[in-house]
Image (cartoon, rainbow, N blue to C red):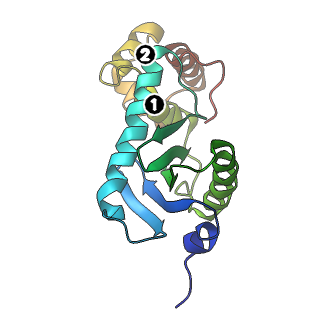
Amino acid sequence: MAQSFLQQTAENVPSLKAVLVTAMPDCLLYDSWVKEDLAWRSEDVAAYFGDLVRANREGLKALGSWSSEMQVTIEAADSLLILREINADFVCTCIFERDAPLGMVRLHMKRLLERVAESLPSFEVERRPRGVRLVEFLNRYAPDPHAVMLRVSLRNGIPLEDLERPERLRDEQVEALEETTRKILGLQTLNI
């Protein structure tokens, strides 16, 4: 039987017990590799890891410390877990043996993530209008996603009906939306 790409990538990494790739935002298992027969199933834990990264992102934003380069490291009794958001569509969780040196884990994790990221599909087939991407980004990362569009509307004078159809925004409205998005999120630049 032919090996999967994830199996080829992960099986020779020392101390690595499992790799789970979770599709976001639904937190569904996309692919996995498990070295040994563990007491849990990949499908059962993948959703929790996606939610954990999402909760961590929101917590860091609340503290004003959010970064797109964040990762979650969990030191459990028998495992070292590292969760990393590869892009907006995928989270990768690597589970190492607990006694693995952290420096080596980071090195292996970096190489593994590069290879996994290259193999993942891209869901962005066409270039969506910048206004649409800004609204999606803001809704995903804003501290209060339920009221964020109202805040944007009040700050810029853009009618709420126009923000509900961001593909129709005029260039000056998109510029105002981008500036407000940066201010709300506390970012100097937006990589969208």
**Image position of 25 with respect to 45: above or below:** above
**Image position of 140 with respect to 157: above or below:** below
Can you identify the residue that label 1 sits on? Answer: 57
The residue lying toward the viewer, choosing from 78 and 11, is: 78
Proximity of marks 2 and 1: CB atoms separated by less than 8 Å: no
For the residue carrying disc 2, how many other residues have a C-alpha within 10 Å: few (<14), some (14-19), or many (20+)?
many
Residue 134 image label: none
**Which is nearer the N-term, disc 2 or disc 1?**
1
**Image position of 116 with respect to 188: above or below:** below
Q: Can the viewer see residue 25 in this picture?
A: no
Q: The residue under label 1 is which amino acid type?
A: Arg
Q: Residue at x 56, y 16 (%)?
A: 176
Q: Can the viewer see residue 41 in this picture?
A: yes
Q: Residue at x 63, y 51 (%)?
A: 109
Q: Residue at x 62, y 65 (%)?
A: 119
The residue lying toward the viewer, choosing from 130 and 64, is: 64
Q: Position of residue 75 (x, y in %)?
A: 47, 40
Q: CA distance from mark 2 to mark 1?
A: 21 Å
Q: Position of residue 32 (x, y in %)?
A: 46, 66
- Quarter holding the C terminus is top right
**Local secondary structure at mark 1:** helix
Q: Position of residue 33 (x, y in %)?
A: 48, 68
Q: Quadrant of residue 56?
A: top left
**Local secondary structure at mark 2:** helix
Q: The residue under label 2 is which amino acid type?
A: Val
For the residue carrying disc 1, how many other residues have a C-alpha within 10 Å: few (<14), some (14-19), or many (20+)?
many
The residue lying toward the viewer, choosing from 187 and 95, is: 95
Q: Position of residue 38 (x, y in %)?
A: 36, 66
Q: Nearer the viewer, mark 2 or mark 1?
A: 1
Can you identify the residue that label 2 sits on? Answer: 152
Q: Residue at x 57, y 18 (%)?
A: 182
- View extreme (bottom): residue: 1
